[in-house]
Image (tube, grey):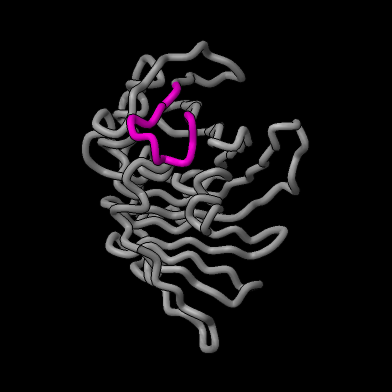
Amino acid sequence: MLDRWNSLARRTGVAVALAAAALVSAPAVAADAAGQLRAFAKDVKSATGTFTQVTRSSQGENATPQSGRFAFQRPGKFRWDVQKPYEQLTVSDGKELYQYDPDLAQVSVRGAAAAVGNAPAQVLFGEGSLDSAFTFQALPARDGLDWLRATPRGSDAGFTHMDLGFSGNLPAQIVILDAFGQTTQVEFSTLVPNPAVAASEFTFVAPKGVDVVKMQ
């Protein structure tokens, strides 16, 4: 991250443990990726799952792969928990966004609305009109997925565009090109739509001795 959020935006993230309880019937599958994204935003109010992500530099060098778990609940609550090869946690309670780095013993805190507004997390975890923050372009299908490209309308998003691959109205992969020429590929697995998610997933209390930095 230029700070911890921008780093997540470049490597994720927005833009996201498994529970099988309280599942709802899956909606009818939309015909294209844009339709599947809109169905996902409309019908999936919460989700849990696991992820793996790899960042490639502008010179084509791969960073160490990361993996972890995520959960979200609309509007604006999400947890992105990197567990390997090191720990790093981003939590939004819908009002504030916390970014905790155990190695640095530091947590940064900022308003969630400003941080998530046009970040990758907004596409998958946000609520409201996606078209006000992004333009969308259909891409050819590949790897068994339907794809589209989301390009932020604002110039301060921290990334150039994000390609999203969908299957069955659920996101399976995202590929983010950031403003520094880095590409981050995130693959989602065991994604469960509309489980009951404990409120504690979206709360954060800084451990004793950790520096808390308030960001503007």
Q: Residue furthest right?
A: 61
Identify which residue, 19 or 127, lies in the foreground: 127
The percent position of residue 50, horizontal first and vertical second, equals: 56, 49
Visible residue check, residue 92: yes
Residue 28 left/right relative to 170: left
Disc tally is 0
**Residue in the picture at 32% in, 58% down:** 112
The percent position of residue 102, horizontal first and vertical second, equals: 61, 73
For residue 5, above or below residue 10: below
The percent position of residue 93, horizontal first and vertical second, equals: 33, 64
Q: Residue furthest left?
A: 128
The percent position of residue 180, horizontal first and vertical second, equals: 59, 37
**Residue in the picture at 66% in, 72% down:** 103
**Residue in the picture at 55% in, 51% down:** 7
**Residue in the picture at 70% in, 37% down:** 57
Q: Residue furthest top?
A: 140
For residue 100, above or below residue 138: below
- Indicate yes or no whether the magenta region holds residue 154: yes
For residue 192, above or below residue 41: below
Residue 19 left/right relative to 39: right
Visible residue check, residue 173: no
For residue 16, above or below residue 87: above
- Indicate yes or no whether the magenta region holds residue 11: no
Which quarter of the picture shows residue 216?
Answer: bottom left
* Range of magenta residues: 149-161
Identify which residue, 171 or 25, lies in the foreground: 171
Identify which residue, 78 or 11, lies in the foreground: 11
